[in-house]
């Protein structure tokens, strides 16, 4: 049986080099976690979610000893990258907890304006998301958590940010980019990660 560790890997969103997750990283470290935020190349999603999720896999393997598991927290597109790693690249063996923050699990209207491969994958009813969602139940061992805000104008429809399993939290954050920086969101993440270790 794998051993759970107090390691949290933070996966930032599109065009985000991780700055939006600095406060979360600090709070988690203050709580005794080893927290890492990842700089995936190229974070526009230009080459697709698979290209990024393979990088995530490599970084998890570099950070984690064999037989130990970590937690994954993905913001926006980062949550979708994390899901592909978990569902298609064997990540379920290395991760005991998955939390998504305002991730377009069922796509977003605005992705229609991203005419490249990764953007097309984030569109509503894309083949990529349809395939992930067909197999979404396999995430159950990670006791997934989805956190979203009804004021999000980046993820449309807003309900696209809710996974159909696990715990769901609605936090009234005014803007999409503020979600991972909101103290209420960070508190939920910290509480969920602590609870997953018990």
Image: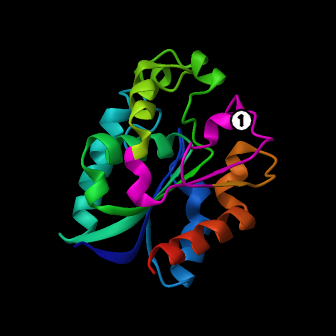
Residue found at x 39% / y 27% = 131
- On the image, which quarter does residue 76 sit in? top right
Q: Is residue 184 above or below residue 3?
A: above
Q: Is residue 135 visible?
A: yes
Extreme residue toward the left, this view: 66
- On the image, which quarter does residue 61 sit in? bottom left
Colour scheme employed for the rendering of this structure? rainbow
- Please tell me whether mark 1 sits on a helix, a strand or a loop: helix
Q: Which residue is mark 1?
A: 158
Disc 1 crowd, CA 10 A, few/some/many (<14, 14-19, 20+) = many
Please state the horizontal and vertical placement of residue 114, each as a whole percent of the image. Answer: 54, 20
Please state the horizontal and vertical placement of residue 196, each as a whole percent of the image. Answer: 47, 72
Please state the horizontal and vertical placement of residue 143, each as a whole percent of the image. Answer: 47, 60
Q: Does residue 136 appear left or right of residue 178 in this picture?
A: left
Q: Does residue 111 appear left or right of residue 135 in this picture?
A: right
Quadrant location of the N terminus? bottom left
The magenta segment is 138-167
29 or 161: which is nearer to us?
A: 161
- On the image, which quarter does residue 124 sit in? top right
Residue 145 in the magenta stretch? The answer is yes
Q: Is residue 50 above or below residue 10?
A: above
Q: Is residue 38 visible?
A: no
């Amino acid at each position: 049986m794998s051993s759970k560790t107090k390691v949290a890997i933070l996966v930032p969103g599109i065009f985000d080099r991780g700055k939006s997750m600095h406060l979360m990283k600090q709070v988690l470290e203050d709580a005794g976690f080893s927290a890492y935020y990842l700089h995936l190349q190229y974070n526009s999603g230009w080459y697709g979610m698979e290209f990024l999720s393979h990088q995530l896999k490599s970084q998890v393997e570099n950070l984690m000893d064999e037989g130990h598991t970590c937690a994954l927290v993905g913001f926006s597109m980062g949550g979708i990258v994390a899901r592909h790693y978990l569902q298609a690249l064997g990540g379920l063996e290395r991760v005991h907890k998955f939390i998504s923050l305002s991730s377009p699990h069922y796509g977003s209207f605005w992705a229609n304006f991203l005419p490249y491969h990764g953007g097309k994958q984030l569109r509503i009813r894309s083949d990529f998301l349809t395939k992930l969602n067909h197999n979404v139940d396999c995430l159950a061992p990670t006791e997934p958590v989805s956190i979203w805000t009804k004021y999000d104008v980046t993820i449309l429809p807003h309900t696209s940010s809710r996974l159909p399993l696990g715990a769901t939290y609605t936090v009234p954050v005014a803007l999409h980019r503020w979600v991972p920086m909101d103290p209420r969101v960070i508190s939920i993440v910290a509480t969920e990660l602590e609870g997953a270790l018990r």
